[in-house]
Image (cartoon, grey):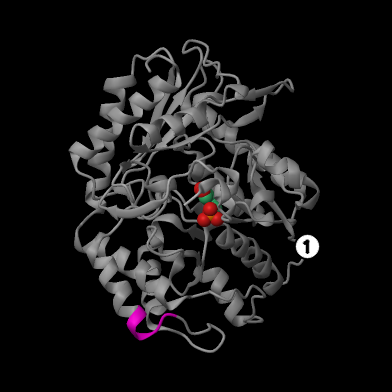
Amino acid sequence: MNASLSPVMHRVLDASLPLAEAGEGVWIADASGRRWLDASGGAAVSCLGHNHPRVLEAIRDQAGRLAYAHSGFFANAPSEALAEKLLARAPETFRGGAVLFLGSGSEAMEAAIKLARQYWLEVGEPGRDRFVARDMAYHGNTLGALALGGHPSRRAPYAPLLMDVARAPAAFAHRLARAGETETAYAARAAAGLQAALDANGPGRTAAFAAETVSGASLGAAPAPAGYFARIREICDADGALFIADEVMCGMGRCGTYFAFEQEGVAPDLIVIAKGLGAGFMPVSAVLVSGRVAGAMRAGSARLANGHTYMSHALACAGALAVLETIEAEDLLARVTPLGAHLDAALRDLLGEDRNVGDIRGRGLFRAVELVADRDTGAPFPASDGLADRVRAEGMAGGLICYPSPGAEWIEPDGTPARCGDHLLLAPAFISTEAEIEQAAERAVGAVRRALGRVR
Ligand code: PLP
């Protein structure tokens, strides 16, 4: 096939993409048999690898009976069972809650925005029509999700189309803590930024605050400082604003617990999950709705004007249910923290002293390496170098799928624009062996060194 004539938009934009033909465990192969070690599950998606037999069997079974029945006419067993299982994993405040199934992380974020708004309409506070989200956040590419996002270059072309969202600072100690500031003091200062954004919206105006519990593609597997989310919860409660945890990337076991916020000791009001939910077998996402919000809707209008053709898709939900059952049956969650520590150790061993490595961070099997021009000052490579793209290309050339991103941008208090270093994200499957984890780290280091022009 002539890639330069491909009508598929992704290949119109990048004709060099190879054609993926087959998946086997943590490997993807093209038709010639060339193989790539998938060390990031694409974008932190494929937590079970690519052809897990148990999931394939469940999908075949469901497809043989019923793939789709419109959610406006029928309920279906897989979505009922999946919703029950997810709510049983959620905090106590989700008893009596509900789950909305959609197709992508962005769709689920859009639905969370609408659910938050709908809640306030139901309880008689229609003035709560504003949102707060953080600098440098990524919440998706549809217009509502993009409006919550804090990524200047993604937003710029569509800025006139985006709703106005008040901004709170990112919680990213590695870049934003002041010299000598303790983690506790930094956490309090970052959380105070939320208070300022709520105040800017005005009392009784904010519907919800949205944040990634562990920042994914934007900041590169960056957990918040200890105590930040506990303070965030208090601040939201005092204002009345709902808290939306965007766990599209960091949730579903990726950080070592089903939900990353479990490690923060807080419970959100709405939980958004996607990538690891369908694990790449099915395009499926979900919003978990707490008992309070679902209860207000049941007692109120019982309407949400957010219909999507493929909502609660039976086949998609059967695939996701099988993913969850597989994680449980094979006790895969127990592997995430030790395998993550193994990956972290391998990366530190190979890159810990590297002059161009500014930070190695993450939780569970969600890890990132930040690349900088100067390790002492943390100065990034210029954006025009396109380092992230080079790492991606060198990874692919060396048989590795990793997930590099350009450094996030922010504005210093004195108004100067600033940038983090480019980073590469590694999010291996939970079924990876230690040898595959080591191989992933070695190939990632090779890609970085070649991208930096150190070796050819
Ligand atoms: N939220 C977060 C934290 C994400 O990382 C992403 C995707 O990377 C999204 C939302 C959007 O998900 P999707 O690409 O499935 O629309």
198 vs 334, nearest the viewer: 334
Secondary element at image label 1: loop
Side of 434 where 279 appears, left or right: right
Which residue range is magenta in the image? 63-67
Q: What x and y, as percent, mark residue 48? A: 29, 55
Give how far across and how far down residue 409 sits, in percent. 63, 30
Question: In the image, is residue 252 above or below residue 364?
Answer: below
Question: What residue did someone put label 1 on?
Answer: 127
Q: Is residue 32 above or below residue 52?
A: above
Q: Nearer the viewer, residue 380 or 378?
A: 380
Q: Residue at x 23, y 54 (%)?
A: 332
- Can residue 193 be seen at all in this image of the molecule? yes
Residue in the image at 37% along x and 78% along y: 78
Locate residue 299: give its quadrant: bottom right
Residue 108 percent coordinates (x, y): 55, 62
Furthest residue in direction right, as rendered: 160
Viewer-side residue, 452 vs 269: 452
Q: Visible in this render: residue 48?
A: no
Name the quadrant of the C terminus. Answer: top left
How many residues crowd around disc 1 within 10 Å: few (fewer than 14), some, or many (20 or more)?
A: some
Check the image and report above or below for 104 versus 453. below
Q: Quadrant of residue 196?
A: top right
Q: Residue at 61%, 37% (x, y): give it.
A: 136
- In the image, residue 446 sits, relative to residue 93, either above or below, namely above
Give the amino acid at mark 1: Gly
